[in-house]
Amino acid sequence: MSSFVSPDQIRDRFSQSMSAMYKTEVPQYGALLELVAQINQATLDAQPVLRQSLTEAGELHRLDVERHGAIRLGTPEELATMRRIFRVMGMFPVGYYDLSVAGVPVHATAFRPVSDEALRLNPFRVFTSLLRLELIADAGLREQARDILAKRRIFTDEALALTARFESDGGLTDAQADAFVREVTETFRWHSEATVSLDTYRQLHAAHRLVADVVSFKGPHINHLTPRTLDIDAAQAEMPRRGLAAKDVVEGPPRRRHPILLRQTSFKALEETIVFTQGGDAGSHTARFGEIEQRGMALTRKGRALYDQLLAQVRSMEGAGSAAADYGQRLAAAFADFPDEPEVLLDQALAFFRHHVADEAGFAARAASGTPFDLAALRRDGIVGARPIVYEDFLPVSAAGIFQSNLGGEEQKSYAANAAQAAFEQALGAPVADEIALYEASQAASVEALRVRYAELAG
Ligand code: OOG
Ligand code: NI
């Protein structure tokens, strides 16, 4: 008889614990949550159809608890241990993101729940980057950074012991789960005392601000937590009115009637006072920021290829990039080629959908009639309905835009694009899941469930 708390519950507690900590560390985050809650309420009030579809899809609940966060790790060992810790909370590495193309010396994955049920309960995810020391050009500085990182211990003894306990016993009790959440939250706490001197900080900073952010501190402080909004344009417009310095453009696809993938915006990092070692020099560091996201439907490989192509088209235009004054119009114009009707997206296999019985009596009658199972016919006759599957992942170009808007314009470095997924997976100690395969499986499972029921009803 097991009295273990489910990993989903541990994740739910952990996401609440992180949110509470970040609210005390970064007061603007509290203001952001309030803003998003108000906009979501107003959007639901104004769009009863949207409220209805979120309710039917079982997604209204998760909206209130939904967040993602981001951390940056320094060593392969930290990443491998992080994977074990997230596993206790039912979070697994999904996707590989190479940010070096965008001048950021990291690569990343997202730890997140994967089953439909776990995602409905609490989809908390953590975008987790690993610093790529090999991209630091100066060999002396690179070795110094490696030495500094090798000395730090970012996990508490109790967090490690409870993780081992989960692995050997197969779960954690209620009290152990609470202790685990408390101990793991410690790893992500902000520390205003650096572990290096001001001089070393400056050298690391000159290599890349991100190198300084990872190497100079005791641990991987959470650098943002992001609530999900139903109307990101409204949120973007409201931010400055509440004193939040929003970045210039919203990353991702343009506004549409039926949102796809992910749209994101953020407000600038805080300037925080730091005390350095040796002489207690004081200085400042910008690391933490706020972000808002709006999630839309997951795209198939074909849909994603079309998205990437249209986005690249806008970004490569003369004098464009997201810095162009008319970026919004250019983006909207390019995406006129991306269908905005759910039926077309489904028929052209551009987006993923979960299928369900919309007309029980009709479904039973059709099955009993001896007609073979024909999904297209059932859909056409309104007997089976399809709801879009929410995109649960991230977008590399958008992530780069988020990193950069918080690094400052003069910070842009460039590295040759060199995705190194195999090296990342070796550090992680496991392969990352292919995110598109997960959506494919979810769609296929929904169809399979219909097929099975149909066969049962056919007798
Ligand atoms: C992560 C930036 C990426 C997102 O939402 O795309 C990210 C970071 O700044 O560490 O969180
Ligand atoms: Ni983010």
Image: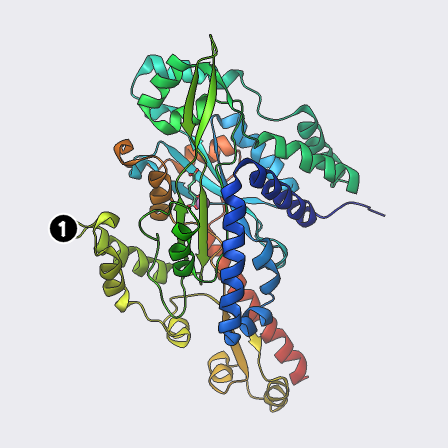
Q: Position of residue 298 (x, y in %)?
A: 44, 61
Identify the secondary structure beneath mark 1.
Answer: loop
At 27% across and 36% down in the image, what residue appears? 409
Q: Is residue 22 above or below residue 337?
A: above
Give the residue pinned by disc 1. 318
The answer to whether the beta carbon of the residue marked 1 is less than 8 Å from any atom of ligand 1 is no
Judged left or right of residue 92, residue 277 is left
Task: Say if 101 sits above or below 291 in the image.
Answer: above
Disc 1: CA contacts within 10 A as few (<14), some (14-19) or many (>=20): few
| As drawn, 147 above or below 253 | above
Q: Residue 24 lies in what quarter of the image?
A: top right
Residue 340 in percent (x, y) is at 35, 71
Residue at the (53%, 22%) spot, across then down: 218
Question: Which quadrant of the structure image shows residue 256?
Answer: bottom left
* Residue at position x 27%, y 55% in the image: 311
Quarter of the displayed picture in which ligand 1 can be seen = top left
Foreground residue, 366 or 303? 303
The residue lying furthest to the top in this view is 279
**Where does residue 264 sit, x and y in percent of width and height?**
40, 52
Relative to 99, is 395 above or below?
below
Could you say which is closer to the camera, residue 97 or residue 210? 210
Does residue 118 appear left or right of residue 231 in this picture? right
Asked whether 24 or 8 is in front, the reply is: 24
Indicate the position of residue 114 as horizontal and vertical percent values. Answer: 57, 52
Any part of residue 238 in sight:
yes
Residue farthest toward the left in the current orientation of the protein: 318
The quarter of the rendered structure image containing the C terminus is bottom right
Question: Which residue is drawn at the image coordinates 32% and 15% (left, top)?
Answer: 139
State the residue in front, 374 or 245.
245
Which amino acid is tagged 1?
Glu
With 106 as the anchor, is 110 left or right in this view? right
